[in-house]
């Protein structure tokens, strides 16, 4: 039986953007810490305010379905900076990376002796001046992969020409002291408004001052920076906690006194009220958290969630307040159970407002830098902005707070790429990964993609330049996220995985198979969650209905599992995607050799005798070559096509005859 495939419209080196503007651009990579989709343009929260990120979005492409390689800082950042998945880096959790010598994490013993970094290749192969500020790579206080030898910046080895991290990476002691003395939060989730006058003492403000100074000096003294284009990476600490943020960034509903009479209800009540009378809380099923309590009690996902369980501290807060003599008045007509919920939900609401305030503060720092860069149009107009986060962040969904799980709230990240040489607002709903950032930057900079010593491709991600050119480009490459617990809880023995395509979210766990600290792979079992989120989040956007145990979806789970490490489709495009693309009957049209560097030889079989149309197309569907061919009396045709005029990358050949259309993908590699 003939297999019917949709053409895997892969991606790499389309030269569309660089062909229009040959000058090497500058790059500004801004990576926030713990930033979820509470960003304007991503529809994560209706009351979030990020006007400065929004300014940049209006000049570039917003990727609304971007995902991280791992929902912890070290795994995600290591994958972003090296272009390699966690399966290769062996960094699944923050404790997996050694801070004394970045390259010592890549060894023959670990099976990953070859490593490149994005700034290293830009510096050494692209002629860039590379500068990192604060938390970009993990262990950032120690300036990882920075050559500390006393040599000029233009002669530095490793990744960075220059590197700077303020103090120990956190805010000044004055802020921590004030926050600690006035903290309104609970254990594990600390927050309070601080005086606006302390803003300049926050680490992100200081780092922004450094970025501004760099731009000013670069504009005045380019020779100091080797007369080269720059790659500037700025790592913002916020919205990572503790959420000690200037008061001016908080929503006006923040409850500063639980004993006020009348009581200040800080959350929007009833749910859905317009105009808002409080902060909008994350959506919940009815009954509240039933999507979590309905999960199997022994699910590894529950162990991940409850490893550092903030949820109970919010519950305990209300219980302690109710036990205080006298308890808060709250108001007449409420039962004690209702009062307890109001106090707990109020504290959760205050925490969410503190998180929103941290985002607004961080956005203000981006605005300060952005405004300075605009004062230098010769730089600004040749700069590519990339704004993203290391991972998402949960705020009570499924009783989960912070990060470290594999649900959508933890693995989804914001991603904006804006090329100021061609500023056009676009939105792409295609599923992408932060693994794709490195190949995209390298291609835009004109730097060849690295290879292993045997010549095989090194990068695990793919260039997003086709989507920058056309956000609707057919594209179905599921995003993989990985995580492994440390300690001796259930789930610490083996990596746990998430696979996200444009409709489904599949999560596969593996149990320890033994009583900790022992591990027994032979006795371990797989556990699963499956959510049909729907294209454009139209079916189950909040992951309330776990379909994993429904036998009707067995084939769906098996297919998505093929994208895990060891699977046939690991890091590949989905060849069975149902997209409005070309239908491929692979046994009718073949190509060899594939990949090719000189000629692509095509063979058509089992078609009708007579004329047919033969075309070579790029990934955006643009026809690069067309001719009319003649199918012989046996239904065959052979042709040799020179690829000298094609850049490295992915293409497809198409033969169309009457109502029959067949195609085959091929790769040009040199």
Image (spheres, rainbow, N blue to C red):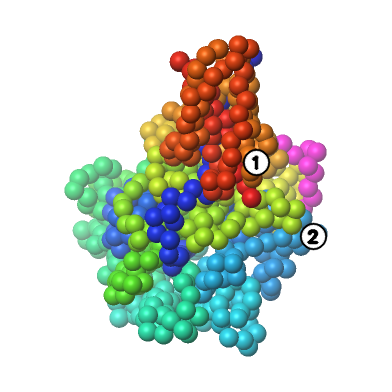
Q: Please indicate, yes or no, whether residue 74 appears anywhere in the rendered image.
A: no
Instruction: Say which of 395 and 23 sits in front.
Output: 23
Q: Which mark is residue 119?
A: none
Asked if residue 495 can be seen in this view, the reply is yes
Residue 254's image quarter?
bottom left
Residue at the spot of label 1: 595
Few, some or many C-alpha atoms within 10 Å of disc 2 (few <14, some 14-19, many ≥20)? few
Residue placed most toward the observer, 632 or 202: 632
Could you give the CA–CA distance between mark 2 and mark 1, rounded to whole angstroms?
28 Å
- In the image, residue 409 lies in the stretch drawn in magenta: no
- Name the foreground residue: 344 vs 505: 505
- From the viewer's perspective, is the residue at label 2 or at label 1 nearer? 1
Task: Inspect the magenta stretch and tell me whether residue 526 lies in it.
Answer: yes
| x and y, in percent, of residue 398 in the image | 48, 44
Count of labels shown? 2
Residue at 67% from the left image edge and 34% from the top image edge:
592
Q: Quadrant of the N terminus?
A: top right
Judging from the image, what secondary structure is the residue with disc 1 in? loop
The answer to whether 130 appears left or right of 469 in the picture is: right
Taking the view exactly as shown, the residue that stands out farthest to the left is 275
Magenta part of the chain:
517-528
Residue furthest to the bottom: 150
Query: Vertically, is 92 above or below 149?
Result: above
Residue 506 screen position, x and y as percent: 56, 37
Label 1 packing within 10 angstroms: few (<14), some (14-19), many (20+):
some
Q: Is residue 282 left or right of residue 106?
A: left
SS state under label 2: loop
Residue marked by disc 2: 108
Q: Residue 143: name its quadrant.
A: bottom right
Residue 656 place in picture, x, y as percent: 48, 22
Residue drawn at (40%, 47%) of the image: 469
């Amino acid at each position: 039986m003939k297999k019917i495939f949709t053409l895997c419209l892969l991606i790499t080196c389309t030269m569309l953007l660089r062909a229009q503007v040959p000058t090497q651009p500058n790059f500004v990579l801004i990576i926030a810490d713990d930033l979820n989709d509470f960003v304007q343009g991503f529809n994560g929260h209706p009351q979030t305010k990020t006007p400065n990120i929004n300014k940049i979005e209006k000049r570039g492409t917003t990727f609304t379905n971007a995902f991280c390689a791992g929902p912890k800082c070290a795994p995600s950042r290591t994958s972003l900076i090296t272009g390699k998945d966690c399966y290769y880096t062996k960094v699944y959790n923050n404790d997996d990376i050694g801070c004394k010598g970045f390259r010592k994490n890549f060894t023959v013993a670990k099976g990953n002796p070859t490593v490149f970094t994005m700034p290293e290749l830009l510096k050494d192969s692209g002629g860039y001046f590379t500068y990192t500020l604060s938390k970009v790579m993990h262990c950032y206080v120690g300036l990882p992969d920075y050559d500390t030898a006393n040599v000029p910046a233009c002669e530095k080895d490793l990744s960075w020409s220059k590197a700077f991290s303020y103090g120990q990476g956190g805010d000044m002691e004055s802020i921590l002291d004030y926050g600690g003395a006035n903290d309104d939060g609970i254990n594990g989730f600390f927050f309070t408004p601080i005086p606006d006058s302390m803003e300049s003492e926050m680490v992100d403000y200081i780092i922004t001052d450094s970025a501004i100074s760099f731009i000013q000096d670069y504009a005045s003294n380019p020779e100091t920076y080797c007369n080269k284009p720059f790659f500037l990476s700025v790592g913002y600490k916020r919205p990572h906690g503790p959420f000690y943020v200037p008061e001016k960034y908080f929503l006006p509903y923040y409850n500063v006194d639980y004993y006020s009479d009348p009581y200040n209800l800080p959350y929007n009540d009833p749910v859905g009220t317009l105009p808002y009378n409080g902060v909008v809380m994350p959506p919940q099923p009815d009954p509240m958290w039933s999507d979590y309590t309905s999960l199997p009690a022994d699910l590894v996902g529950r162990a991940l969630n409850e490893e550092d369980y903030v949820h109970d501290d919010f519950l305990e807060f209300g219980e302690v307040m109710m036990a205080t003599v006298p308890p808060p008045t709250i108001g007449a007509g409420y039962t004690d159970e209702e009062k307890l919920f109001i106090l707990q939900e109020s504290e959760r609401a205050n925490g969410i407002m503190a998180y929103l305030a941290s985002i607004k503060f961080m956005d203000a720092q981006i605005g300060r830098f952005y405004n300075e860069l605009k004062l230098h149009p010769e730089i600004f107009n040749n700069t590519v902005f990339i704004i993203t986060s290391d991972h998402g962040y949960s705020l009570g969904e499924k009783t989960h707070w912070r990060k470290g799980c594999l649900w959508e709230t933890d693995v989804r990240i914001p991603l904006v790429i804006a090329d100021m040489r061609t500023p056009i607002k676009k939105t792409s709903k295609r599923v992408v990964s932060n693994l794709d950032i490195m190949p995209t930057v390298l291609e835009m900079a004109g730097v060849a993609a690295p290879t292993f010593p045997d010549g095989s491709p090194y990068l695990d991600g793919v260039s997003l330049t086709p989507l920058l050119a056309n956000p609707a480009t057919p594209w179905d490459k599921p995003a993989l996220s990985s995580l492994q617990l440390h300690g001796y809880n259930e789930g610490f023995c083996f990596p746990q995985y998430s696979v996200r395509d444009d409709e489904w979210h599949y999560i596969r766990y593996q149990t320890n198979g033994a009583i900790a600290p022992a591990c027994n792979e032979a006795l371990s079992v797989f556990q699963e969650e499956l959510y049909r989120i729907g294209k454009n989040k139209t079916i189950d956007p909040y992951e309330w209905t776990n379909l994993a145990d429904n036998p009707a979806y067995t084939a769906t789970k098996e297919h998505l599992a093929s994208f895990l490490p060891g699977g046939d489709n690991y890091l590949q495009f989905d060849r069975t995607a149902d997209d409005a693309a070309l239908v491929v009957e692979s046994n009718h049209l073949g190509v060899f050799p594939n990949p090719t560097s000189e000629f692509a030889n095509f063979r058509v079989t089992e078609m009708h005798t007579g004329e047919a149309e033969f075309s070579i197309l790029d990934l955006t569907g643009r026809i690069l070559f067309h001719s009319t061919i003649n199918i012989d009396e046996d239904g065959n045709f052979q042709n040799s096509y020179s690829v000298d005029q094609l850049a490295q990358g992915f293409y497809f050949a198409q033969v169309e005859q009457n109502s029959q259309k067949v195609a085959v993908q091929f790769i040009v590699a040199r």
